[in-house]
Image (cartoon, rainbow, N blue to C red):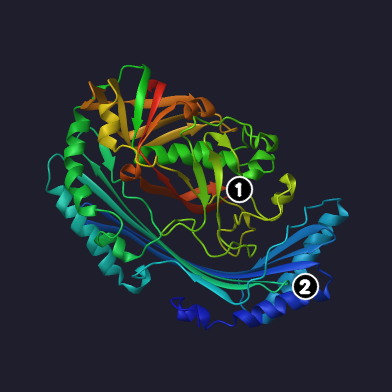
Amino acid sequence: MPAGIDEAFLALPLSGLADAALSRARELGAAQATFRFERVRKAHSAVHDRTVRGSLDETVTGLSVRVRRRDVTGFCAIAEATPDAAARASEEAVAVAEAAAALGERTAEPVPEPLYRNKSWVSPAAVDPFSAPEAERTGTLLGWSGRLLSAHPVKHVLAHLFAVKENKFYADSAGTVTTQQRIRLHPLVFVTGAAATLRTLGPPTGRGLEYLDGDGWDWDAELAALPGHLAEKERATPVEPGVHDLVLDPSNLWLTLHESVGHATELDRVLGHEASYAGTSFAAPESLGSLRFGSALMNVTADRTAPHGLATIGFDDEGVAAQSWPLVENGVLTGFQFDRGTARAIGARRSTGCSFAESARHVPLPRMPNVSLRPAPGGPGVEDLISGVGEGIYLAGSDSFSIDTRREHFQFSAQRAYRIRDGRLAGQLSGVAYQARTTAFWRALAALGGPSSYQVFGADMCGKGQPMQTSATSHGCPAAVFAGIRVVRAG
């Protein structure tokens, strides 16, 4: 029995369901077939001021079959967990492939992958959030809310806790069989004063309830500082639009990295396959090895193996083992993210393991791994970067953003923005938003923080596809200085 995987999930007839589906697919002439059985449990607790305002605990369970028949892919998902239902899913998937083939559709043959027989993987969560009673989870939020409400100038508090546990069983006709469990947690607190609102910066993470006790983030320190930040924001001076040097805290830079680099290097966007939701990309297959994405300080890595990463897994939804690889090296584009099908478009011999579906009800799509900007070895800390800027703006915390359908032109704002004067912070500014063209922005990277400034943030509700699917991904960044960036005053 794989250690740590939910016993109730393992008690399901997973192998029997897979055998029924895969054998039926073979009988119907499928050249390849994959089977997934998934149980995704999600919980959400919400506290407004000193009152519990909402609680949700839902589980989505189902199986799906994807087949390759007559050079076309067919897919079917069924909620029923019986061998007959699994066989019926294969029949429906083959019928879909046959219908698409009759219309002249063709899909690329997946590139090969080594076999992994009876492998398991469990994310490193010390305390399963679903092992604790609901009262314990809301009790933490109520405690935080009461503490903040007692501090000036906080008038209202909205506290959330999101928890997700994914159990996944995968088997394919080649012989790979994997079982996985992944847990993530996201506490989120908003404080409102008379004229401003702020939220905590603590990121979603691949941890369990131990995260609330300070394992991975100092919640006590952040909650203690939040009222003071709010008071200063309410006194903030409107920013003067113009061209400024920016010092971006990793709590702000991660979102810019996600939108302008992470999504821009998804190969299906580059190829134009993914255009209906959030657009394509300015990059092209022939850009590899030649596109000057940023300054020589820019080194970006894609990774499915980082500890506690939101996109960290053992195997993807095509049976590909997790790995890491470079996307940008010394400012030059050197990699993309892709699955076994899109790999052939650039002549890759192996997938980067980026196939993922929100649940068994969804067709797997190429989805973003953890994408991180590497710090400068021996580089400076945040304070040292600020001290090196005579006049500029320091931004912390992600907020609103806008980016065009080619991931080329964007605007981002922040939770908090500070004027830098003579290398020191000189009070908060309001309405700060920065605009740039993606490659011009990253080429303006003038200084990079070292490991002491490096932090990991991320998105746990990243949307893609039609119908839309969500996935989660982490982004590590150091603090960084960008020279001569256009700043506007946002409403």
Q: How many labels does the image show?
A: 2
Q: Is residue 242 above or below residue 232?
A: above
Relative to 300, 379 lies left or right = left
Residue at x 17%, y 47% (from the top left corner): 224
Relative to 489, 367 lies left or right = right
Taking depth in this image into account, of 470 and 243 the one nearest to the observer is 243
Relative to 63, 259 lies left or right = left
Residue at x 24%, y 62% (from the top left corner): 213
Q: Is residue 436 above or below residue 88?
A: above
Image spot of residue 350 (x, y percent)? 68, 56
In the rendering, which numbered label is found on residue 25? 2
Image spot of residue 172 (x, y percent)? 69, 71
The three-letter amino acid code for the residue at tag 2 is Ala
In the rendering, which numbered label is found on residue 337? 1
Kindly indicate the quadrant of the structure image that contains residue 154. Answer: top left
Image spot of residue 352 (x, y percent)? 61, 54
Earlier residue among tags 1 and 2: 2
Closer mark to the observer between disc 1 and disc 2 = 1
The three-letter amino acid code for the residue at tag 1 is Gln
Taking depth in this image into account, of 28 and 222 the one nearest to the observer is 222
In the rendering, which numbered label is found on residue 264? none
Mark 2 is surrounded, within 10 Å at the Cα level, by few (under 14), some (14 to 19) or many (20 or more) other residues, namely many
How far is mark 1 from mark 2, CA to CA?
29 Å
